[in-house]
Amino acid sequence: MGTPIPNRRIESISSGSSEVIKYKLTPEELAALPSTPPMTGKKHKPPISLANRNVDPSQRKQPKETVEPKINYEPRGKTVHVSSEQAKAIMFLLQPIEGGWTEDELIGEHANAPNDWRDEAAALNGMPLGDLINALYVGMEIKEG
C-alpha cells in the first residue's frame, strides 16, 4: 500500500478521532524495554520551563539596564575652503523647496556627472567629490576673492 492521497469527501465523512485509552505498563513490560542512555551532547537541548504563574510579578528578576557606550567621534575630514559662488550653488541646490535635494542626493548627482552643472549650480563644475562631501558634512569656509 502506498501513500494515501488526501480526499476532501473521505475526510468530511470521517467521524473524528477515537477515544483516548489510558494504559499503564506493567513492571514486566517495563523490564522488557531496551535501556536507553540519557540524552547528552550538542544536539540535546534541555526542555524549556515555564515560570510559575502564581509568582508575584514584583518578585521576578528585572532585566539589567544597559548603559550606552559613549562614542567619541571626531570628523575625519577637514573644513573645505570654497568660493562664494560654490557656496551659493550648494545652498541653492539644498533649498527645501519643491525639487530640493538632500545632501546624499546632491553627492550622488555630482558623482555621476561632476561637470554637468548649469545655471545657478555651474560653479560646482570640476569641484572634487571629496571636497563636496566634506563641505556638506564637516563644514565649509567661504574664501574671499
Image (cartoon, rainbow, N blue to C red):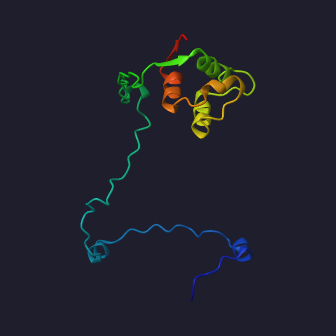
Left-right relation of 139 to 31: right
Left-right relation of 41 to 133: left
Q: Where the N terminus falls, by quadrant?
A: bottom right
Front residue of 65/46: it is 65
Residue furthest out toward the top: 144
Q: Where the C terminus falls, by quadrant?
A: top right
User: Could you tell me residue 101's position as x and y percent?
Assistant: 66, 28
Left-right relation of 16 to 83: right
Residue 99, by quadrant, is top right
Residue drawn at 62 percent across, 27 percent down: 102
Q: In the rendered view, would you say 36 is above or below 96?
A: below
Front residue of 25/3: it is 3
Residue drawn at 51 percent across, 28 percent down: 133
Front residue of 59/107: it is 107
Residue furthest out toward the bottom: 1
Residue furthest out toward the front: 145
User: Could you tell me residue 72's position as x and y percent?
Assistant: 35, 21
Left-right relation of 122 to 22: right
Q: How many marks?
A: 0
User: Could you tell me residue 43's position as x and y percent?
Assistant: 32, 61
Front residue of 39/63: it is 63
Residue drawn at 25 percent across, 72 percent down: 35
User: Could you tell me residue 139's position as x and y percent?
Assistant: 49, 18
Residue drawn at 59 percent across, 18 percent down: 87
